[in-house]
Image (cartoon, rainbow, N blue to C red):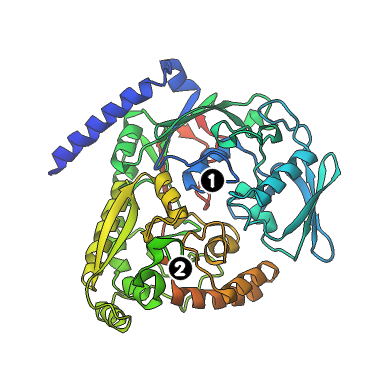
Amino acid sequence: MNMSSLSRVALGAAATFALLVGSAALTPSQAQQSVLRIGLQEDPDMLDPHRARTFVGRIVFKGLCDKLFDASADLQLIPRLATEWGFSADGLTATIKLRAGVKFHDGTAFDAASAKANLDRARTLPESLRRSELATVDSVEVIDPLTIAIKLKQRDATLLSQLADRAGMMLSPATFAGDVGARPVCTGPYRFVERVQNDRIVLEKFADHWEAANYSFDRVIYRSIPDTTVRLANLRSGELDMIERLAATDVKSAQADRSLRVIFTPGLGYQGATLNLNNGDAANTPFGKDKRVRQAFSWAIDRAVLNQVVFEGTHTPTMQAFPPSSPYFRKDLPATPRDVAKARALLREAGVTTPLKLEMMITNNPVDAQLGQMIQAMVQEAGFDLSLRSMEFATQLRDQQQGRFQISRVGWSGRIDPDGNVHPFWTTGGGQNDGKYSNPEVDRLLNAARAVYAPEERKKLYDAAQTIANDEMPVLYLYNQPWYYATSARISGFQLHPDGMIRLAGMKRQ
C-alpha cells in the first residue's frame, strides 16, 4: 500500500470517527467551549480503583477520583485529600489529617470514617489489586472526624507513595454494596455520567469540588481509539483536543504541524512482556518451567533493532525494571546484544530439539502488531515457533490474570517509588504477578526494602533481587518508553509529568 492509499485510509477512518463523535449529541457551542475530548490508546478496564489495573484507567481516574496524595512534576509527594501527615518515632504509625469540606459526588461528606472504609476495602477485598500495595497495614483507626492513624506491621518507606495512586483514591462507602465500577462515585473534580464500552467515558464538572475553580471544562469525554493513525487524524481534524501516547513515527510530523503542540517527558516504567511460570495449564511447557528456555527467548531478541525500526530511536533498550533516570537503575545490567547462537545453545541444554510452539498476546494497535511481528521473526531464528494473538487490551489483561496465556506483551507506566515497579510483579501473590512467579528470597529482599528508608541501603536489596529475577525471568524487559502527547494548539495549561497522567487542572481552550 502506497502513502497516498494510507492517507485515504486515515482520512476515511477519521470521517467515520467524526460520525461517532457526532453521536454523542454535542452542539457546536459545546464542542468548542465547554467539552475537552481526549483520545486514549485503549479502553480502560473497570472503573473501580481498588480492582483496576490499566494505564488509561488511571488517566480517567485523574478527573474522577481524588487521592490522599499526588506527585509533583519533580516526583515529590504533595497533599490532596490529606493535608498533614507524620510518622511515629518507631515508624509504625502514620497519622494523616484530612481536608475539611470535601464531598463525594453523591453529596455525602468525606471524613475519617470514609477514608478508613476505603483503605479497609482496598486491603481486604478478595479481588483488590491494592492488597499487596497495602500489605504492611495492620489496621486503620479513626482518631477524630478528620484524622486517621494507619498502624503498620513493619516500617514501610513506600506507604505514602502507594496512597498517591489508586490505593489512596476515595469512593463513597454508600456504593460499596453494589457494582462500584459500573457507576463510580468519588470526590474528584468531575463526576461520572456514562460509559459506552470500547467507545467513550463521559464526565461532567462537579460544582461542589473543593478546587472547582481550577477546572475550566464543563465536560470531559475520553474516547478509546487503538489505531494511532486514526487517533492523530482526529486530533488534526479537530474531533479531539488531545491524545496520549503519540506514536514515535508520528512525532516529527506532529511537531511540524502548527495546529498542534507536542509535549514530551521521560517515563518512569518499562515495556516488555509478562511470562507465565505457574498460572494454570498454559504454564506447563518448557518455557514456563525452565528458565533456560526463557533466557533463550530473550537472547534471540535484538532490542536495539526494535527501538530503531518501531520507535525511530526514541526509546531506550533495557533489561531491567527501573529506567536509566532512576537511582535504582543498575549500570552493570545493560541491554545485551542479540546472540542467536547462545539462544540455540540454551534450548539444546534444556532438551528442546524441535521448534517450540508458543503464543504471545498483543494489544490490537498498529505499534504492538509491528513489535509482535518483529519479535516473532527474531525468535524463529533461534528455534521458537511463536504465534500472535491480538486482542482488546482489557480482555488481554483479563486473560493474563486468569492464566490463559504463555507470553503477554504488556508494560508498566512506573511509580515514583521503586517498590511499585517490582514488588507487585515479583513477590508471591503480588497484585500484578499474573505469571505466579514465586521465590522466597526475592520475597524477603523486596519486603525488607519496604522497611528501609536510606536509598543506598534500599538499592542493595533491589540489586540483589534483580540479580535473581533477571536470571529466572518472570518478566521480559524490552525498552523504556518516553511519553509523547499531543494537543491542539488552542489548548493551554497542560503539564505532562513523568507518570504520564493527564491533569485537567489549569487546562483551557484559547
Q: Residue at horizontal 69%, vertical 31%?
A: 104
Q: Is residue 444 visible?
A: yes
Residue 256, percent across and down?
31, 43
- Residue at the extreme right: 144
The residue carrying mark 2 is 474
Q: Residue at horizontal 36%, vertical 70%?
A: 287
From the viewer's side, name the closer residue of 427 and 410: 427
From the viewer's side, name the closer residue of 310 and 433: 433
First along the sequence among labels 2 and 1: 1
Dot 2: element: loop
Residue 123 as seen in the image, left or right of residue 466: right
Q: Is residue 28 above or below residue 3?
A: above
Residue 26 as seen in the image, left or right of residue 74: left
Type of the residue with mark 2? Pro
Give the quarter of the image for residue 89: bottom right
Residue 52, labelled with which disc?
Answer: 1
Type of the residue with mark 1? Ala
Q: Split into 4 quadrants, where in the image is the N terminus? A: top left
